[in-house]
Amino acid sequence: MKKQHIINETFLDAILAEKLGTTYTHPREINDPDFDEAAQHFIDLLLRANGFKPVKTAVVHPIDKESLLGAVRAAQFNVIKPVLIGPQHKIESVAKVNNVDLEDYQVINVKHSHEAAKKAVELAKKREVAAIMKGSLHTDELMSEVVHKENGLRTERRISHAFLMAVATFPKPFIITDAAINIRPTLEDKRDIVQNAIDLMHMIKKDKQVRVAVLSAVETVTSAIPTTLDAAALSKMADRGQITNAIVDGPLAFDNAISLFAAEAKGISSSVSGNADILVVPDLESGNMLAKQLKYLGHAVMAGIVLGARVPIILTSRADPMDMRVIACVLASFIYNHTKAKLHSQSGR
C-alpha cells in the first residue's frame, strides 16, 4: 500500500503512519518550533523502545475520549497491551463515538471508578498486569488503592512521581521530582525520591553518568532555609553510599543547576551545574509550579510516571495531549523491560 502524505500531524503521527502504512490525521495540538525541537528527544525515546515487548497495562476507568484514545494510541505503537477496566457500557459508548474497535482489547466490566482502581491494583498484585494507567478518575482515588497498607502496591521504597521534561533551551531531557505525590517530604522520603529518579534515568539515558541537583532558593547551607540542610545532607548521603549510582550536589539554586555560566558567576564549582539530569525540588508545591511553568511558558514537553511501587503507574493529567500519554507509557515500558532483564540476569547467576 502506498504511503500517503501526513497532514496536521502531532509529533508522533508521522511515526505512527509509517508504522501502519496509512494516513493518520489528527488536529495538531501544538504548533511551535521550540516544542517540536524538544519533542525530538521523546521521539528518540519512543524509537529506542520499539524493540521492547508491549507492557500489559490496566487502564483504569477509560470512559472519556482522552483516556481511551491515549491507551489505544500507545497500543498502536506496540508500547502497551491495554486491559480496559470500567463500566463496559460507558467504555463501549466512548469507543463508538470515537471510532475505536474494542475487539482487540480486553474489557473488564466493573460498576464505577473506585472498583476499577481496586481491580487494577488486584491484577498488579497477582502479576496479571505489569503497569497501571490512570484514566478518567481523580488521582487520589487511584493512588489511595496503590498505597493501601494491606492491599496496595507498596515496596520498601517511598512511592514518588517523576516528570521527564525536555525544553529546546536545554541540551537533554531531565527529570523533575517530586511534583505530584509527596507534599512535604522528609529527608528520608527525599532519599527514596532521589534514588527512584536515579534508577529511572539510568534506564533511559545512553550516557550512564547521572547528575542530580538538589534545589533550594540559595546555594549556601543555612538553618534559616531548612531545605538547604536537606540538600546538603542528601549530597553527603550520596558520598557515603546511602544514595547510589549518581553524583549528587546541593543545595543549588535553579539557575546554578541548569546554567554553568550562572554557577561560575557565583563562584560555584560543581560537576552538576549546567549538566543536571535530575532536579530534586524541595516540596510538591515548588515542583508542580516549576514543571507547569516550563510547560506553559517554556514550551516544554513532559511525561509523568509514578515510581517505587510494585509496577510503574502512568499518571496522566486531564490537560495532557495525546502524545504525552503515549510517552508516559514508553517510560513504563522502559521500567518493565529493564526490570525484567535485570531479574533474568540475576536468576542466571
Image (cartoon, rainbow, N blue to C red):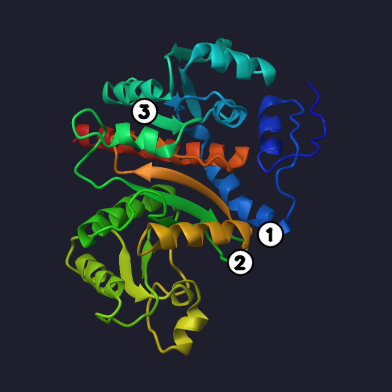
Residue that mark 1 sits on: 34
Q: Are marks 3 and 2 in contact (CB under 8 Å)?
A: no
Judging from the image, what secondary structure is the residue with disc 2 in? loop
* Mark found first going from the N terminus, 3 or 1: 1
**Left or right position of 252 against 166:** left
- Quick one: 136 or 21, which is closer to the camera? 136
**Which residue is painted at 55% across and 16% down in the image?**
90
Residue 138 % position (x, y): 45, 36
Q: Distance between the residues labelled 1 and 2?
A: 8 Å
Report if residue 297 is visible in the image: yes
Quarter where residue 228 is shown: bottom left
The label on residue 130 is: 3
Numbered circle sitting on residue 140 = none
Q: Quadrant of residue 309?
A: top left
Horizontal and vertical percent for residue 347? 21, 32
Name the amino acid, label 2.
Thr
State the residue in front, 273 or 91.
91
User: What residue is shown with label 2?
Assistant: 169
Residue depicted at 54% across the width and 11% down the height? 89
Label 3: how many Cα within 10 Å (few below 14, some 14–19, many 20+): many
Give the structural element (helix, strand or loop) at label 1.
Answer: helix
Query: What amino acid type is highlighted by mark number 1?
Result: Asp
